Amino acid sequence: MRYNPGMTTVTDAATRAAARRATWHGQLTTEHHPVQASEASAEQRLALLTELSVLAWTLSGRPLPSYSRQTMPGRLIRRLGEEAG
């Protein structure tokens, strides 16, 4: 029993999130390069991500990170039911 019946379980939330990702038809864009998400190649999406990331770092006033890939901070989050392989 849940304390608040309006709250969902982790499984419900993960299922809803997966459904939203599968049906999203948004637009990936920068000021100069609009691209339909459903039609963008991996290379186009990566180029936009790179451009937006550099812009975000620049606007923050902080220097770009200079660490190597081996020392890059992060963690791996697996999908529900996905096993390490």
Image: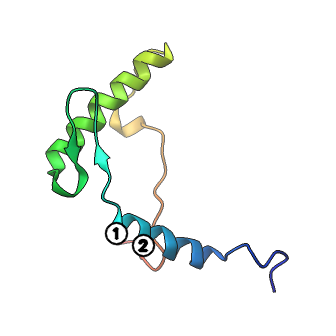
- Looking at the image, residue 42 sits to the left or right of residue 84; the answer is left
Q: Name the colouring of the figure.
A: rainbow
48 or 70, which lies in front?
48
* Label 2 element class: helix
> x, y percentage for residue 30?
28, 31
Mark-to-mark CA distance, 1 and 2: 5 Å
Could you say where residue 23 lies in the image, as x and y percent from the top left?
34, 68
Q: Amino acid at mark 1?
A: Ala
Expressed as whole percent of the image width and height from the top left, the position of residue 18 reads 43, 70
> Label 1, on which residue?
22
Name the residue: 41% across, 16% down: 58
Identify the image quadrant of residue 28: top left
Looking at the rendered image, the quarter that the C terminus falls into is bottom left
Residue contact between numbered discs 1 and 2, judged by CB atoms under 8 Å = yes
Q: Which mark is residue 19?
A: 2
Which residue is pictured at 30% across the width and 58% down the height? 25
The answer to whether residue 4 is left or right of residue 23 is: right
Does 41 sit above or below residue 55? below
Pick the quarter of the image with the N terminus: bottom right
Query: Which secondary structure, mark 1?
Result: helix
Is 28 situated above or below 24? above
Q: Is 4 placed left or right of 58 in the picture?
A: right
Q: Is residue 29 above or below residue 19?
A: above
Q: Residues within 10 Å of mark 1 (few under 14, many from 20)?
A: few
- Residue under the image location 45 percent in, 17 percent down: 59
Foreground of the two, 38 or 46: 38
> Callout 2, which amino acid?
Ala
Image-based side of 75 in relation to 39, left or right: right
Q: Is residue 59 above or below residue 33?
A: above
Q: Residues within 10 Å of mark 2 (few under 14, many from 20)?
A: few
> Quick one: which residue is furthest to the bottom in this view?
1
